Amino acid sequence: MHQPIAIIGAGSSGLAAAHTLRDAGYPVTIFELSSSVGGRATTRQLNGFTYDHGAQYIKQGSPASVSLITNRFRLPDLLDIAKPVWTFDSAGTIREGDPVQNAEPKWTYRGGLISLFQHMATGLDVRLRTSVASLHQQGSIWHLLDQHGQPLGSYQRVLITAPAPQALTLIQASRLDDTLHQAIHTHLSAAQYNPLISIMLGYRPAPSPRPYYALVNTDRQHPISWLAWEHEKAPERVPPGSGLLLAQMAPGFSRQHDHSPDSLLYQEAANLVTTLLNEALPEPCFQDIQRWPYALPATRADANALNTLTMPTGLAFCGDSFVGGRVHLSLEHGIDVARTLIATT
Ligand SMILES: Cc1cc2nc3c(=O)[nH]c(=O)nc-3n(C[C@H](O)[C@H](O)[C@H](O)COP(=O)(O)OP(=O)(O)OC[C@H]3O[C@@H](n4cnc5c(N)ncnc54)[C@H](O)[C@@H]3O)c2cc1C
């Protein structure tokens, strides 16, 4: 029997790593600070509306992630979003999108992107609402502690999947060899994240149908970077007769409005949407907001260099800080790093 391994974070990289390790005979325990799995690939249900307020869909990646989605954890409500993504610029000109990119599948689930991760988490030992606040290194053992200093368990191997800034906070609060601490700090600091505010606007009647499912801002000069017709994913995601537009605000706008009240942001987003679409939309009948402090990595850290240093001590790192902000890349990185951990134990 192999020694148990702790995984910090139940997002796509943590769950993919967990299955890879479990397949190889390692018992795994996943600690997740939030109340659900999926991390930034998640779904919310509120007032009859269902929406993916983080990642919008999963792109086709390597055979490893494709087989995970379409084979091993295939769900009957897996869907490929039918309509394409078009583009817009700062002047508001809307154009057809890239046909090559639009030919690729855009996978989500009728019930929301979270379905995949709930399915992957089934049967795994996942401790929800459990934040690992610090690690204490004692010889070859890592003691995990919560925010009250209470022990969460002791492990020889710990895999950290949190975005680099959160991983850094954890390392800074931890007790470990000084040289190792400094090296981890230097490597993780290379991954810088942009914030992103997602704003959901429900309309009744629904906005008029368009030939596209979403619009992406290509010149990066518009306050909105992405606008999606969430109800195009599946009609049952909204109450009958309603529609849901989801606006992801650009990094500059999101940073500038970090402390702006929700009411102001709803108004600003609704005005920007009306202007962009040149459509007389009614007052939104539903509004919701999600502020992502660490949405997408603008720069990455070097996982190989970091893991080469830390793995001999039992610590490993994976996730989108090292591979870029895409769900399929995080799934693949979780698998890769777990395989390396297996090979080095
Ligand atoms: C608004 C938005 C839109 C996006 N759109 C797309 C898209 O359309 N397509 C796409 O492919 N990707 C998209 N992405 C990126 C994608 O969501 C991420 O790259 C991917 O989900 C990252 O997975 P991960 O496992 O690396 O990290 P995460 O999903 O962040 O998982 C890490 C987990 O660790 C947990 N955690 C952190 N610290 C601790 C701690 N101390 N103790 C316990 N748990 C902890 C977190 O709660 C989280 O659940 C988007 C992201 C955002 C925010």
Image (tube, grey):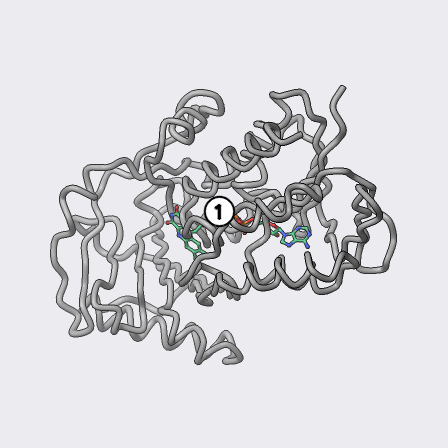
- 65 with respect to 177 (left or right): left
Q: Residue at x 79, y 45 (%)?
A: 142
Query: Looking at the image, is 293 positioned above or below residue 162?
Result: below
Image coords of residue 135 (percent x, y): 77, 53
Where disc 1 sits, the SS reads: loop
Q: Residue at x 13, y 44 (%)?
A: 99
Between 201 and 55, the residue placed more toward the observer is 55
Say if disc 1 is inside 8 Å of ligand 1.
yes
Image x and y of residue 40, in percent? 51, 51
Q: How many marks?
A: 1
Q: Residue furthest right?
A: 150
Question: Taking 150 as reference, is 78 left or right?
Answer: left
Which residue appears farthest toward the front when viewing the image? Answer: 179
Q: Position of residue 75 (x, y in %)?
A: 46, 25
Number of other residues with Cα within 10 Å of mark 1, as a class: few under 14, some 14 to 19, many 20 or more? many
Q: Residue at x 69, y 39 (%)?
A: 30
Residue corresponding to mark 1: 41
Which kind of residue does numbered mark 1 sit on? Ala
Give left or right: position of 321 versus 139.
left
Query: Is residue 43 at all visible to an observer of this figure?
Result: no
Q: Position of residue 272 (x, y in %)?
A: 29, 73
* Most foreground residue, 226 or 186: 186
Up/down of 253 relative to 121, above or below:
below
Image quarter of residue 133: bottom right
Q: Residue at x 34, y 71 (%)?
A: 270
